[in-house]
Image (spheres, grey):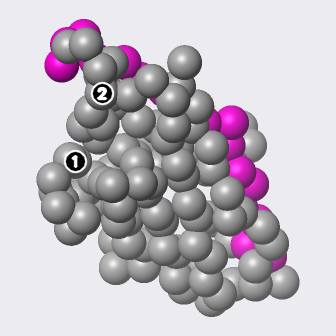
Amino acid sequence: QVQIVESGGGLVQPGGSLRLSCAASGTIGSIYVMAWYRQAPGKQRELVASIISGTSGGNTNYADSVKGRFTISRDNAMNTVYLQMNRLKPEDTAVYYCNAILSRPASPTPRYSYWGQGTQVTVSS
């Protein structure tokens, strides 16, 4: 069994900052990609940022709407990914979900996708 647990959401004023954390635990072989998605009311879930396995700097990818404001990083030893969100805007309000693409210990394939339960981020004055 694999668990994905997010934390760090909350209410923040426009221009403020929040740091989200996501930890993967359980029967894990290797984690290949960890990513943050978000879903605002009435909208589809969208990719915010992703980071591929490797160094903590890793290969990263960002949605255009968050480039220059959000930073994704990863602690491979702890199977944890972070999302530092700066200069937050009201349009960043959404439920943020963590996703991990991983394999089981016995074999590098197949790979599985797991989701966390989500954490609410509200940007409002």
Where, quadrant-wise, is the N terminus in this rendering? top right
Number of the label disc, if any, that sits on residue 66: none
Which secondary structure lies at badge 2? loop
Name which residue type carries label 1: Ile
Q: In this view, does 15 lie above or below 64?
A: below
Query: In the shown orientation, is residue 30 left or right of residue 88?
Result: left
How crowded pointer 1 is (Cα within 10 Å; few <14, some 14-19, many 20+) is rated as: some
The residue wearing badge 2 is 29
Say if residue 48 shows up in the picture.
no
Q: Which residue is drawn at 38% across and 28% down?
A: 28
The residue wearing badge 1 is 52
Residue 91 placement (x, y as % from top left): 63, 65
Say if residue 100 shows up in the picture.
yes
- Of residue 17 and residue 116, the one placed in the foreground of this image is 116
Residue 25 placement (x, y as % from top left): 51, 37
Query: In the shown orientation, is residue 75 left or right of residue 96?
Result: left
Name which residue type carries label 2: Gly
Residues in magenta, as a range:
108-124
How crowded pointer 2 is (Cα within 10 Å; few <14, some 14-19, many 20+) is rated as: some
Q: Which residue is drawn at 31% across and 54% down?
A: 76
Q: Which residue is drawn at 49% across and 74% down?
A: 84
Mark 1 or mark 2: whose residue is earlier in sequence? 2
